[in-house]
Amino acid sequence: MSKAAPAKKPAVAAPPPGCTLDINDPQVQKAAIRIQASYRGHRSRKELRENGPPRVLEPLKDVVLIEGSAAKLTCRISAFPDPFIRWSKDGKELRDGPKYRYIFEDPDVVALVVRDGELADLGQYSINVTNPFGQCSDSARILVEVPAKVQKGPDNTKARKGTTVTLTAEIMGEPAPNVGWTKDGEDIEEDDRRGRGPAARAGPGAGAWAPERRRSGTGVGEVGGEEVSWLISPAQGARKLTCRLAPALRVFFEIGSTTTTLTIRRATPQDSGKYEVYVENSLGMDQSFARVDVA
């Protein structure tokens, strides 16, 4: 009995010209990466669908913004279907535009970029994530650092003898800068006693009265380390209360949140000269000058 000849395997047809794939081809590798990324995105979305309402997976973190640069707040969330994202600063909504950019990175990562940093960007930033199943939110602060600056220096001043002269400068900086004034290179003292009351000296029992005070005829008219007296008239009789006030500085300066002011009381020709205001913080320093002439 003769054996049948084995069946021949059908010949594999060669692919048409131009249809071969070279795994070393950069374009083929890029296509494979895109397919893998698409699959990862599909898998992530499937997982998000199973998780339900929006959730914050990685919260926002405080960011330090240097003046003139950009800051980025990043948050990882879980939400399906695709949520509505809203960013706000100190309760006011921020619109996507040149100053604030909404960024969507991976399927679950969103970010806000704040451009051209300035002191006004200091504040609390919040993200609100909403979809049909619910909402979630998170907040963080942007801390702005600004080099110390004298935005507007004091003006040159001419004054008459005996008058009060004031020099004012507009300042800025974050952290708040150290501030100083000099005259012809010599430091001027800051008045840090504002708002403090005088220390009173009175006889026994004086603190128990409810006095009606008036300045006596022996009181000193100018505060300058002198004693000032009042007559106190309770029902039992008059008593004298004497206060010694701390010496008032004739030349001093004060520091506000955005300004500093130098005051010269009872100006004399010796007060004429070159005055300098300087500011300094960890990021830099600045200074400005003005001339005072008293005649």
Image: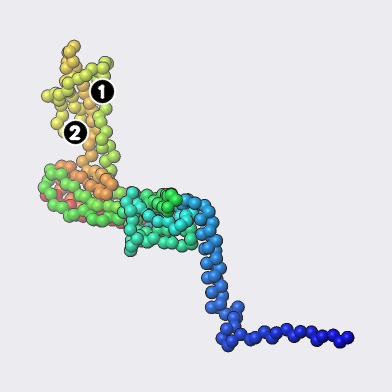
Nearest the viewer among 23 and 186 is: 23
Up the image or down, 236 lies above or below 148; here it is above
In terms of sequence position, does the residue under pointer 2 or pointer 1 come before the other?
Answer: 1
Can residue 274 be seen by looking at this rendering? no
SS label for mark 1? strand
Residue that extends furthest to the top in the rendered view of this protein:
236
Q: Quadrant of residue 287?
A: bottom left
Identify the mark at residue 223; answer none if there is no mark.
2
Residue 39 pos. (x, y %) = 55, 65
Amino acid type, mark 1 = Arg
Which residue sits at x=67%, y=84%?
A: 12
Nearest the viewer among 98 and 229 is: 98
Amino acid type, mark 2 = Val
Q: In which quarter of the image is residue 75?
A: bottom left
Tell how many labels.
2
Residue 289 pos. (x, y %) = 23, 56
Q: Classify mark 2: residues with Cα within 10 Å, few (<14), some (14-19) or many (20+).
A: some
Left or right: where does residue 141 sit relative to residue 150? right
Can residue 15 be seen by looking at this rendering? yes
Which residue sits at x=60%, y=78%?
A: 23
Residue 213 pos. (x, y %) = 17, 23
Residue 242 pos. (x, y %) = 21, 23
Do the CB atoms of the residues marked 2 and 1 lie less than 8 Å apart?
A: no
Q: Distance between the residues labelled 2 and 1?
A: 17 Å
Disc 1 marks which residue?
A: 201
Q: Quadrant of the N terminus?
A: bottom right
Up the image or down, 200 lies above or below 169; here it is above
Nearest the viewer among 175 and 205 is: 175
SS label for mark 2? loop
Which residue sits at x=33%, y=56%?
A: 94
